[in-house]
Image (spheres, rainbow, N blue to C red):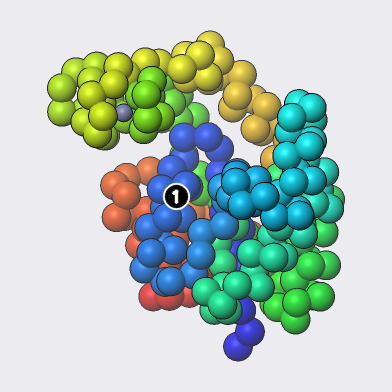
Amino acid sequence: MSAQTVVLLGPPGAGKGTQAAGLAAESHWPHISTGDILRAAVAAQSPLGLQANGFMERGEYVPDPLIIDLIKERMAAPDARGGVFLDGFPRTAPQAEMLDQLLADLGRQPAVAILVEVARAELIARLSGRLTCQSCQRIYQLTSQPPRHSGICDVCGGTLIQRTDDQPETVARRLAVYDEKTAPLIAFYEQGKRLTAVDGMGSQDQVAARLKEAIGWS
Ligand SMILES: [Zn+2]
């Protein structure tokens, strides 16, 4: 069977980044986060990285074709032969179509999408309980992953703050923007019968088990 591509979808606070990292470690499939590959390409000053940097320095979005090229380059690496988890891309239905074209070009199966669903009230509680270290940017969660000493980073001793992004009124707005932007993408994968919804409530292990079942590992 040719390489699989699993697109992880879910609102901010659904825990998909953490889940993707865990699944990637277990499967040895890379977790391809667009933010990470952009930062890596810029740091490496690769031709694509230099182009992307130009847009970012001007405060502009990096255009889709450039992101697609970066993903293509990352997928060509030997560790991506078995499959990959995509996190942060596609974000729109046109991007999902571009991804399908890329996968066809690479001779891979069409992507499948997994949507991690979490009740709205729980998302708001999770996001507004987030604290970020001012120095090393590590994220804590007051109920599920609190720091050992209140207000102090376990790793570097820095001060923990609540980012403006995580304040309750901002959280509600972020979730509304997510709904509006993501609905067409969810519809795209639903129409193609390529979407599986997974319950994102419960412990990290419980959610991981559901995700593995959705991917067909169990
Ligand atoms: Zn820190």
Q: Residue at x 74, y 30 (%)?
A: 57
Question: Left or right of 7: which side holds 17?
Answer: left
Give the SS element for disc 1.
strand
Q: Position of residue 3 (x, y in %)?
A: 61, 79
Where the C terminus falls, by quadrant? bottom left
Query: What residue occupies the far bottom of the structure in this picture?
Result: 1
For this rendering, which residue is in front, 170 or 33?
33
Q: Position of residue 92 (x, y in %)?
A: 76, 45
Where the N terminus falls, by quadrant? bottom right
Q: Position of residue 13 (x, y in %)?
A: 46, 35
Q: Quadrant of residue 201?
A: top left
Query: What residue occupies the far front of the structure in this picture?
Result: 45
Q: Residue at x 69, y 60 (%)?
A: 71
Q: Which residue is mark 1?
A: 199
Query: What residue occupies the far top of the structure in this picture?
Result: 169
Q: Residue at x 51, y 59 (%)?
A: 31
Three-letter code, disc 1: Asp
Q: Position of residue 186 (x, y in %)?
A: 69, 49
14 in relation to 218, above or below: above
Q: Residue at x 40, y 29 (%)?
A: 137
Q: Quadrant of residue 192?
A: bottom right
Question: Left or right of 25: which side holds 93?
Answer: right
For this rendering, which residue is in front, 127 or 139?
139
For this rendering, which residue is in front, 119 or 42?
42
Q: Is mark 1 within 8 Å of ligand 1?
A: no
Q: Quadrant of residue 183?
A: top right
Is any atom of residue 48 visible in this view? yes
The quarter of the rendering in which ligand 1 is drawn is top left
Question: Left or right of 16: which side holds 26?
Answer: left
**Label 1 crowd (10 A; few <14 / some 14-19 / many >=20):** some
58 in relation to 181, above or below: above
